[in-house]
Amino acid sequence: MVAFSLTNLISNPGYNASYPLLIVAWGQSIAASPRGAMLQLGFRDNAQPRELLAKIEASGKLKPATIEKLKRRLAAHQNCLEGLPMLVAAVVAGNSAGLDAAYMNKMVLAYVLSRFVFVHMYIKATTQRASLVRSLAWWAGNACWIMTLIKAGSKLNA
């Protein structure tokens, strides 16, 4: 049994890290959440955490630009969580079909990298032009799992 490590991921072409890398994708989704930012700003409500952003906005204690940034962070978080089931499906389908481990690793890493750009641009972009980069990153991530599902289906039907 070969342990999960970055060294194995890079130097061992037969090493399949696609399942453990799903944890990275999930962690990325959690990191995008506005919860940490709201805690840093001094706002907490563990009893009703999903209502906290609305309460903060209603309090008038933060600038509108800060509220908008928190809203964009929440939207990025939700979008990442919405995309995870398709990534998981692609990893299961690709591995079940026997797709190459190196391909599976690259696919999940490309997804995570595209989502990193997506989250960063979602939080930072305030113009229509900048939001286009975010949209391109979103499509790049989706292309990863779409192509994997197509490849898996083709291999299973060969």
Image (cartoon, helix red, strand yellow):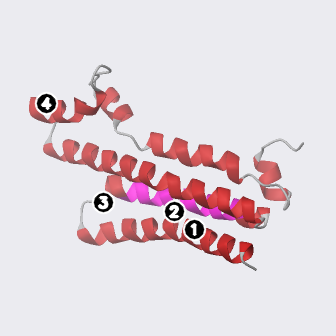
Which residue is identified by label 2? Answer: 114
Position above or below: 76 against 96: above
Say which element carries label 4: loop
Q: Where is residue 71 in the image (x, y as percent from the top left)?
A: 25, 46
Q: What residue type is labelled 2?
A: Ser
Position above or below: 132 against 3: below
Residue at 56% x, 61% y is: 111
Residue 105 is marked as: none
Which residue is identified by label 3? Answer: 125
Q: Cβ–Cβ below 8 Å for labels 3 and 2?
A: no
Say which element carries label 1: helix
First in residue order: circle 4 vs circle 1: 4
Q: Which amino acid does label 4 sit on?
A: Lys
Q: What residue type is labelled 3?
A: Ala
The residue stretch that appears in magenta: 104-121
Q: How far apart are marks 3 and 1 (CA)?
A: 23 Å
Which of label 2 and label 4 is nearer to you? 2
Q: Cβ–Cβ below 8 Å for labels 4 and 1?
A: no
Residue 144 is marked as: 1
Residue at 75% x, 67% y is: 99
Which image quarter holds the N terminus? top right
First in residue order: circle 2 vs circle 4: 4
How many other residues sit within 10 Å of disc 4, few (<14), some (14-19) or many (≥20)?
Answer: few
Which residue is identified by label 4? Answer: 61
